[in-house]
Image (spheres, rainbow, N blue to C red):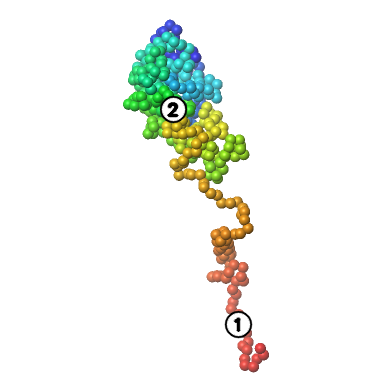
Amino acid sequence: MLSSLIGWSKTHETPKALETIDERLLKCGISRRAFLVFCTSLMVAAPYGLAITDKKTPEGVAAGLGGVIRPAVIWLHFQDCTGCTESMLQTSHPGFADLILNVISLEYHETLMAASGLQARQALAEAVKRYSGKFILVVEGSIPAKDHGIYMMLAGRPALEVLTDIGGQAAAIIAIGSCASWGGIPSADPDPTGAIGVADLLPSHSIINVPGCPPNPYTMLGVILQYAADGTFPETDEQRRPKFAYDRNIHDQCPRRAHFDAGNFVKQYGDAGHREGWCLYEMGCKGPDTHAGCSTRNFNEITDVWPIGVGAPCIGCTEKSIAFRVPMFQVIQIHTIAAPPTSYAPIAVTHGSISPLATGVVGLGVGVLAGAGYIASRKFSKSENDQTPPGAKPPGPPESPGPQAGPGAAS
């Protein structure tokens, strides 16, 4: 990655003042159309609940963001797999990563920067000093806290110390991914390093969690840009997650929900139900207890790019009490109002006798049909006050009485 993207040059010159997003895009030759596509993607990720996209058109979002000063971002890595970074850069649109890196001012990122060793350490110190109290700190990966943090050292300092130092000078902190949010994979039993999340170490700081393994990159970008625009974070839930991105239960809008309601469950990978796209609940799917927008907000604009979309159960990676705590294929108890059906009416009778209940139901149905026929006959009868049964001859004028049989008449 070019060193200009992290605000550092080989001559150690002080970075220039940050431009507005419009000024930067114009300087870099990024088209207005590309920026509008980016703003449209933000709107899809946050149709409501995010101030920069709420009740706006893509043109309105672009106009609002264009005048915003590019936010200075310092991105630190701890115990992670770099999947959160990869999800942001491996986009479906060529050049889209370049646009993202010009919308924000990425001052330090160990994976993307060309510098290493002493030069990288100097770049970090310079960025923190220049933007102290103004930069947004993005943290990827959990922090080892056991044994005074000896399981991860950065330039001779424990990760605990580095995060405490730099986090204390940040305007706000975004914990991206499940590892940074609350420990993630490194914190799974037996948790040898004592992995914790950012908020566990710095509970009183302005921190927002964007969990997921990995999370949707537009969620993180939306949070950064709202903070850059007006200095506020979106509304969060009790786990510090932005509600606009974690406001829905995957189960409620799962594309396989109809099979759940019908009782069609995959029993084994590769079986007929799995090939037909049946519900994965019995394979350990955590969707009924997981809040995320995976089922409606596609990753990198590609449909079905998420576990359930490719035939794997949801592991609940956005839930602190589920992800890497509950075994992947363990069936969970459902806490929503929807529960898997316990019995189903037979399609055909499999024995020779007919139960009294079935007879009663059929009789009731016949009675309903007869009643409907009776009502219909009333509608089409031409005789006033016709009360004869359906199909009977309507009453005519009264007939005169015939001759009466007298005494002695032949019998």
Q: Is residue 118 left or right of residue 265?
A: left
**Could you tell me residue 5's position as x and y percent?**
46, 15
Question: Residue 221: in sight, yes or no?
Answer: no
Which residue is the extreme one toward the left? 204
Tell me the kind of residue under disc 1. Ser
**Could you tell me residue 113's position as x and y percent?**
47, 14
- The residue nearer to you, when weighing 86 against 190, is 190
Label ID, residue 88: none
- The residue nearer to you, when weighing 126 against 143, is 143
Q: Quadrant of the C terminus?
A: bottom right
Which residue is the extreme one toward the right? 410
**Could you tell me residue 26's position as x and y percent?**
47, 17
Q: Residues within 10 Å of mark 2 (few under 14, many from 20)?
A: few
SS type, badge 2: loop
For the point 55% across and 21% down, the residue is 94
For the point 60% across and 51% down, the residue is 347
For the point 46% across and 18% down, the residue is 102
- The residue nearer to you, when weighing 266 against 192, is 192
Q: Residues within 10 Å of mark 1 (few under 14, many from 20)?
A: few
Q: Earlier in the sequence, mark 2 or mark 1?
A: 2
What residue would you read off at disc 2?
A: 190
Tell me the kind of residue under disc 2. Pro
For the point 56% across and 61% down, the residue is 356
SS type, badge 1: loop
- The residue nearer to you, when weighing 22 against 350, is 350
Between disc 2 and disc 1, the foreground one is 2
What residue would you read off at disc 1?
A: 400
Which residue is the extreme one toward the top? 11
**Could you tell me residue 208's position as x and y percent?**
39, 27
Q: Quadrant of residue 303?
A: top right
Question: Residue 115: in sight, yes or no?
Answer: yes
Distance from the alpha carbon under mark 2 to that under mark 1: 104 Å
